[in-house]
Amino acid sequence: MPRQYVYVTTHMHVEGPIPGPHSLLTLASAAHRADGSLIATFTTNVAELPGATIHPVALSSWRGRAEDWLATRRAPRPPAAATADYARWVDDLAAPAVFVTDQDGQDHVYLYWYLQRFVGSWPFVAAGSRAAVPGMLPAAAVCPLRRCRPAAHQQVAA
């Protein structure tokens, strides 16, 4: 019998191109079975890192989305608590989890950095590109912002 996995798609909002000098603001993930059925979701706002600043390009983008920026700042949780809860959520899924990522995006870099920095481990058994995931994962509406950009896992072929 082939091993069963859970596929975790993620959408996040950040302050710049790399973690550390810039902060993760919102983390939202959806866990799916291989057939695309939704198992669970996780969403949290994350407090800014001490000393981190917003990148000028990100600032320009957020200026046109003031309501969304404010939504990322509602009830932000300390990075250590937010990432610890996220790691527990992944660990509690029904099967080993595969992190589904857009190879051109920054989601993997941010999540890996935050989990290593604040939890000390990576809870996924593997990371794979959207193209490597079996079947077609549905476009889970996990982004909590009104004017959210489509995440890599939400793009539908024409």
Image: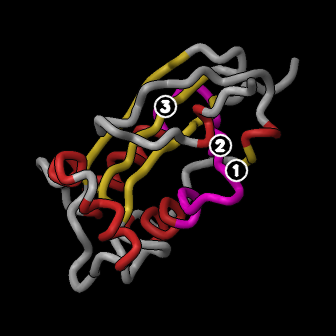
Which residue is the site of mark 2? 100
Residue 51 versus residue 64: which sits nearer the camera? 64
- What is the quadrant of residue 60 in the picture? bottom left
Q: Earlier in the sequence, mark 2 or mark 1?
A: 2
Numbered label attached to residue 127: 1
- Magenta extent: 91-109
Numbered label attached to residue 30: 3
Q: Secondary structure at mark 1?
A: strand
Graded by Cα atoms within 10 Å as few (under 14), some (14 to 19) or many (20 or more), the crowding at tag 2 reads many
Residue at horizontal 51 percent and vertical 43 percent from the top: 10
Graded by Cα atoms within 10 Å as few (under 14), some (14 to 19) or many (20 or more), the crowding at tag 1 reads some
Residue at horizontal 67 percent and vertical 27 percent from the top: 156
Residue sitting farthest toward the left: 75
Q: Secondary structure at mark 2?
A: strand
Q: Earlier in the sequence, mark 2 or mark 3?
A: 3
Q: Is residue 104 magenta?
A: yes
Q: Alpha carbon of mark 2 to alpha carbon of mark 3: how far? A: 10 Å
Q: Alpha carbon of mark 3 to alpha carbon of mark 1: how far? A: 15 Å
